[in-house]
Amino acid sequence: MRTFERKTKEPDHTIRPYEQRDREVVRRICCETGFLGEPIDAVFSDREVFADFLTRYYTDIEPESSWVGEKNGQVVGYLLGCKRWHLNRWWNLWNQIGLAFKVGWRLLTGHYDAKSRKFLKWIVTRGWRETPAAPSQSAHFHCNSLKGHRKIGIIRDLIMTLFEDLRKHGVPKVYGQMVTYDSRRTERVFEYMGFKVVSKKRISKYEKTVDKELYLTTAVMEINETREKKSIIYDLPMG
């Protein structure tokens, strides 16, 4: 098993802590990459609700656990982390209630087209059943980057920055949940990266939109395991 160990030598990018001025660009990147690395608009038209669901806790409640990657002065990637998992659990419950009222009103007023209604139906009727188990006492993260910035450098360095922060705070493990399919991001790839796949479930939300079987996979990293291992470079978007 291998782990991320070293950041990029002589990088052409900068990793820095998330700041409030980054909120809108983080939300935009989230939406631009939300459908398997492509814009979420293909399956869901409400970018405000989508970004609120995926990013609002991190940017508004625990911004100190997040970072952005810049290239040529522009934010092109982000990592949103959570060390306060108990707070995250209760806050998400409150946030989902608020989003339910917002979405309900927009449904009543004809805000959504057929594809968006299908997406929302999946969330309500099947999403919770197709979400794999995740560690209950663990940090977690969500990251993404724009096209052209996924293969090397920025994503790896963002994840390494998170690991350093978790070690500093004595957090023993962290997990991420990623969409996997076919030969991309398989269990073997995760193990090569130093993560351990602990659960996965087939998801149906993109049926008839994507001609392949998709899975939502939970991968866990033990932060304080032995560090005498080589670094690697790999694409790890979270969309």
Image (tube, rainbow, N blue to C red):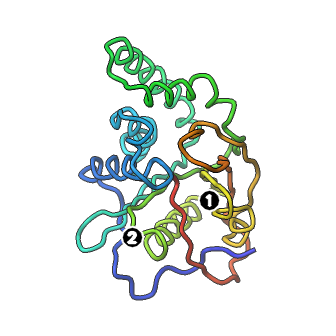
At x 56% / y 72%, what residue is drawn? 234
In the picture, the quarter occupied by the N terminus is bottom right
Q: Amino acid at mark 2?
A: Gly
Place of residue 67 in the rendered image (x, y in percent of width and height, measured from the top left): 40, 60
Q: Is residue 59 left or right of residue 194?
A: left
Front-most of residues 126 and 6: 126
* Circle 2 SS class: loop
Q: Is residue 56 left or right of residue 210?
A: left
Place of residue 66 in the rendered image (x, y in percent of width and height, measured from the top left): 42, 55
Q: Is residue 83 left or right of residue 99?
A: right
Q: Is residue 131 left or right of residue 67?
A: right
Place of residue 30 in the rendered image (x, y in percent of width and height, measured from the top left): 40, 49
How far is mark 1 from mark 2, CA to CA? 34 Å
At x 36% / y 24%, what residue is drawn? 112
For discs 1 and 2, the disc positioned in front in the rendered view: 2
* Mark number, residue 170: 1
**Label 2: how many Cα within 10 Å (few below 14, some 14–19, many 20+):** few
Which badge, 1 or 2, is on the more N-terminal residue?
2
At x 48% / y 76%, what residue is drawn? 152
Residue 5 picture quarter: bottom right
**Label 1: how many Cα within 10 Å (few below 14, some 14–19, many 20+):** few
Q: Amino acid at mark 1?
A: Gly
